[in-house]
Amino acid sequence: MRFKLFFGAFFFILATAAPPATALAAFVGGASPLPFHMWPKGSVESGVYQVSVQEARQTGCEMPVVVRGNITQYAGSDQYVFEDATSSILVSIPPDRWHDQDVTPEDLVELHGRLLRSSAGVRIAVAKIIKLQ
């Protein structure tokens, strides 16, 4: 009787303590980026592809964009003019986004942000700056 009770208790503990096989599996596949509405505010999903400024202007409001080019001039407050080979656009870069990087008009940068439309025009709200040169 003790023998049955011991093994019964042993298998019960073993069955409840062992995680199910699916809990040990890793996520595989699904190369598409996280849906836009699920992104944390102020971040840009790494699966977003680089576009030109001209292409960025044609995307919808609040859409994420990644552009490469040069910040060519200061436009006042947190506003700057950004240019690539296709066009130029106003970008908003809060002071905390610079991360102690010095960027000159000659420096090639990659900006990650969201396209915003308003009565004042189109601009990119920058979440991240990557200095490429």
Image (cartoon, grey):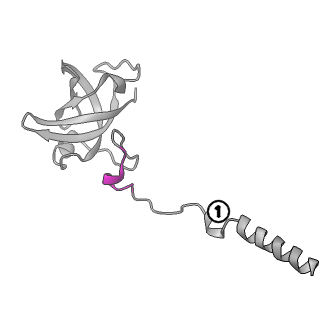
Within the image, what quadrant is residue 118 found in? top left
Q: Residues within 10 Å of mark 1 (few under 14, many from 20)?
A: few
Foreground: 40 or 90? Answer: 40
Helix, strand or loop: magenta stretch: loop
In the image: residue 120, left or right of residue 53:
left
Residue at image x 26%, y 25%?
71
Q: What residue is shown at x 28% (from left), y 45% (from top)?
A: 64
Give me the residue at 77% from left, 68% from top: 13
Q: Where are the magenta residues, as a range? A: 33-40
Above-or-below relation of 23 to 11: above
Mark 1 — residue? 24
Q: Quadrant of the N terminus?
A: bottom right
Please provide percent x and percent y for residue 3. Answer: 93, 78
Q: Answer whether residue 37 is magenta in the image.
A: yes
Who is closer to the viewer here, 55 or 3?
3
- Residue 1 versus residue 125 in the image, above or below: below
Image coordinates of residue 113 in percent, x first then y, are 29, 38
User: What kind of residue is marked 1?
Assistant: Leu
Image check: 110 left or right of 63?
Answer: right
What secondary structure is marked by label 1? helix
